[in-house]
Amino acid sequence: MAEYSPMMQKYLETKEEYKDCILFYRLGDFYEMFFDDAILVARELEITLTGKDCGQAERAPMAGVPHHAAEMYIAKLVNKGYKVAICEQLEDPKNTKGIVKRGVIKVVTPGTIVESNMLEERKNNYIMSICKSGIYFGISICDISTGEFYTAEIKDNYNFPMLLDEIARYTPAELVVNSMMADCQEEISKIKERFENIYITNFNDKFFKSEAENLELRFNIVNSNGQKIENFPEKTLAISSIHALIEYLEQTQKTTLDHINKIVVYPLSRYMALDINARRNLEITEKLRDKSKKGTLLWVLDKTSTSMGGRLLRRWINDPLVDVLEINRRLDAVKELKDNVMLRGEVIENLKKVYDIERLAGKMAYGNANARDMVTLKNSLLKLPEVKRVLNDCKSDLLKDLAINLDELQDIYQLIDGAIIDDPPMTIKDGGIIKLGYDEEIDTLKTAQTEGKNWLVKLELEEREKTGIKNLKIGFNKVFGYFIEVTKSYLSQVPDHFIRKQTLANAERYITEELKNLENQILGAEEKVVTLEYDAFVCIRDEIAKNVKRLQRTSEVISSLDVLTSFADVAEDMNYCMPEVNSTGSLDIKKGRHPVIEKILGPGSFVENDTYLDKQDNRLSIITGPNMAGKSTYMRQVALITLMAQVRKFCSSRIC
């Protein structure tokens, strides 16, 4: 059998390393897929399947997509549950003899997406690792786009049901599991049955390591209150899941992940126990029927102004607290925002102009932020001093703490404002992004570019006068550079020092020594300034990336303020009242209303109901009535009102 062509041999070597991925192989302006990958992609993306000579008797099946539109196609494949390995040209073809060196620069999986246009703005994209040991589990959860990282151990009587509850809490797009977990076919089947679109990766057991020392040196490991964990080395299952998840992220992303710098170790008892069935039937964040947001509790409560606030609200709803002191602390903040209309209005007005600092910080650290991202970040930071000023007069403890912890980040604002133009292009390698006055050498070269264009205009006028050719003009194209164009009716007037360059149907193109010298000056300046602007931009991005922890802390403050303000706004609009939360064990609801149904029907349409339950003589209520009488509505209403109170939210009733 004949050998494969050299290019195809390189492709097959790369494909061998990434057997579980669709390999996007860069050839010129296209990413090409071959053999089984090509057949699969042609079917899934509905694109043309062609063929390519590969040194064999039969042509290799081939399908390709333009490199500038690759993200759209990758997003479609990932949404369908595939992993995509992106193999790029690592050398400039113009400066290379023979086959251009190529290598995989990134693997995109459902749980490792960082591109903004592939993510939902108001929803986290989590990836979870699971380390199973006997009947116990260690879990770690990360959103690579924001840098959030959580871990916990499940060691109880009902371990697997609790694991399902944690998966339901985070709804990860992807699971990374050890061999013991992967071999439990019954458990894996139940996970796939409950979470239809989840992608499961069986990861090598050697990466599920139990050493804590390296993690403690690399990360800030804290509990849910932000305090240092003392007995962390004892949590071997959690540690194993952390190691595996970090290794998986580094293998797929092939870059530093400095924005992942804090790991939160949380106890399962910190949050109200909501099993997977309760979450589904209460329709807290998505409808049971069509998975949409409208008609859910989240739909009622979400009046957040920022994307990061929207994500935090979703987390708070999924994680109702059980700590009475913390609940009341946040309720006091909501009360102040609800009662003070001027305060709430100023906060909302400023937050509307704050963009997604959390994900922008991740992009800066990740190294894929462009100049427009920087301008967006700058415009967000511009509003922070005003937000801090508004919060300085607040009375509740939580709002005062938010004011103290809000870093205005004006040094970063000044850096971007002094360096990046206000309306930069999308690309960062074509120049036109750095302001005049930021770098002396860039300024000099830009001036040479401007003067060079003036020199060309002046030369064109001079040559017209010297030759008498009225329609003589100087033009440019990428093949021939600058040229003098003369129509054929004036060819008799062309001087001898004009050197013919190109013949057209109705004109001739020439160059002169003077024009050639100007071309060298202008094009030399253009090429150099593009390189210098790119280098300057990368330095600015790296400087911002050094401050990623400050950006993340500020995004936490803004997100919390946004959610609290949203709660206050909804409470005002829907006439909700402040619950009295204590640890007596009684539930006393007066004039309760179902929050979702009331919003759908409109104010005044829902018939109010009372409820009283306690731990003694009133542990049970028997509800009777015909079909469609509202029994299920009443039960869900009680559950949702209780959940709203423990999420630190005012309720559609008076609850004690």
Image (cartoon, rainbow, N blue to C red):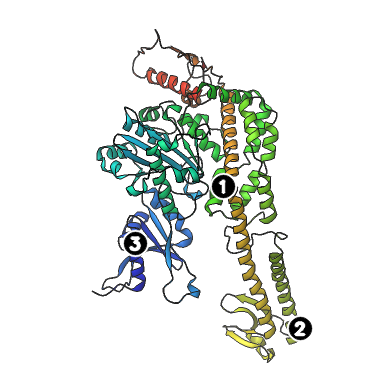
Label annotation for residue 361: 1
SS at mark 1 in the image: helix
Count of labels in the image: 3
Name which quarter of the figure residue 164 lies in: top left
Q: Residue at x 45, y 38 (%)?
A: 150
**Marker disc for residue 22:** none
Which residue is more in the foreground, 338 or 510? 338
Q: Is residue 131 visible?
A: yes
Q: Quadrant of the N terminus?
A: bottom left
Query: Is residue 295 positioned above or below 145 on the image?
Result: above
- Residue corresponding to mark 2: 465
Expressed as whole percent of the image width and height from the top left, the position of residue 516 reads 66, 82
Answer few, some or many: residues within 10 Å of disc 1's Cα (few below 14, many 20 plus, some between 14 and 19).
Answer: many
Task: Name the disc covering residue 15, or none.
Answer: 3
Q: Assess whether mark 2 and mark 1 are in contact (beta carbons under 8 angstroms).
A: no
Whole-angstrom CA distance, mark 1 to mark 2, is 58 Å
Residue 322 screen position, x and y as percent: 47, 23
Mark 3 Cα within 10 Å, few/some/many (few <14, many 20+)? many
Residue 152 quadrant: top left
Front: mark 1 or 2: 1
Q: Please state the horizontal and vertical placement of residue 446, each as a whole percent of the image.
A: 69, 67
Q: Are marks 1 and 3 in contact (CB under 8 Å)?
A: no
Of the image marks 1 and 2, the number of the one nearer the N terminus: 1
Query: Seen in the image, is 537 located left or right of residue 233?
Result: right
What kind of residue is marked 3?
Lys
Residue shown at 36% from the left, 13% from the top: 623
